[in-house]
Image (cartoon, rainbow, N blue to C red):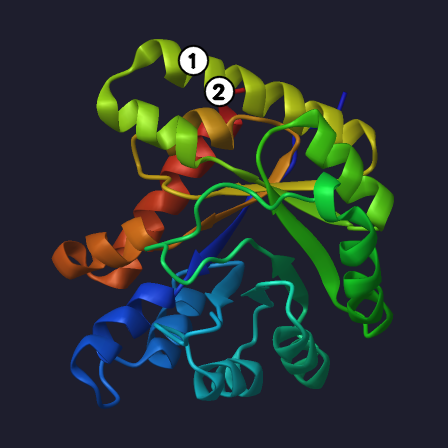
Amino acid sequence: MTEQRELRLGVNIDHVATVRNARGGGLPDPLRAARLAQDAGADGITAHLREDRRHITDADIEGLMRELTVPLNFEMAATTEMQEIALRHKPHAVCIVPEKREERTTEGGLEVAREENRLAHFIAPLREAGCRVSIFIAADRRQIDAAHRIGAEVIELHTGAYCDACAAGDTTTRDAELLSLKAMAAYADSLGLEVHAGHGLTYQTVPPIAALPEVKELNIGHFLIGEAIFLGLEPAILEMRKVMDVARSAH
């Protein structure tokens, strides 16, 4: 059984860029948000450079690599273009996510088992360059096994279905999703994979996920940026850190 250990918080700044790009120009500045998140105690910054550049841009990634003092988790699709960008910057971590141009945000986890050979070859140069490779997947044993076989060091469990069930008041689905997340976090940990989790987490939904002893990092963005409109970014992050820590220490 994994020992209880500190839980890291990665803050995703994509949607600061979404607001900026809605009007054009340079404000609000995602890099400023990243610096504020650092100062508020974020353990890392997550940014997703999408093919269509709908929020984070290449210039944002360059600025983050230049100025961050905490690790950058660079989310990207498994494309040649993104691989080249990652190999040029060599961020601390690269998280491979599914990406469809028509989606509003990332929907579901990556289908690793179906593309195992291609993904194994895709991530090999990233690992050789010193990047920690993470795979964003559903809480599914088949996908976890495939992620392990291709040489990923980290998996990030998709918590979206659990959070959606919470929002809908569907306690049956919520409980089933939580049981699956719990079981698959333990299973991935038993294989030697580091376990992260994220997508849709809020102050209300984060405690059961934060309580899972195998989970080492939560990546949270949209909710924190939304709360920052009302509270400010630093208080929003500090509150999330508090909720996470209370949940982890209670188990």
Could you tell me which secondary element the residue under label 1 belongs to? helix
Mark 2, Cα crowd under 10 Å, few <14 / some 14-19 / many 20+, is: some
Q: Nearer the viewer, residue 17 or 122?
A: 122
Q: Residue at x 17, y 55 (%)?
A: 231
Could you tell me which secondary element the residue under label 2 belongs to? helix
Q: Left of 47 or right of it: where is 116?
A: right
Q: Is residue 113 visible?
A: yes
Q: Which residue is mark 1?
A: 175
Residue sticking out furthest to the top: 172
What amino acid is found at the position of numbered circle 1 in the picture?
Asp
Mark 1, Cα crowd under 10 Å, few <14 / some 14-19 / many 20+, is: some
Q: Nearer the viewer, residue 182 or 142?
A: 142
Using the rendered view, name the quadrant where residue 168 is placed: top left
Using the rendered view, name the quadrant where residue 84 is placed: bottom right
Q: Which residue is mark 2?
A: 178
What amino acid is found at the position of numbered circle 2 in the picture?
Leu
Is 12 above or below relative to 52?
above
Is 94 above or below relative to 56?
above
Q: Position of residue 196 (x, y in %)?
A: 60, 43
Quadrant containing the N terminus is top right
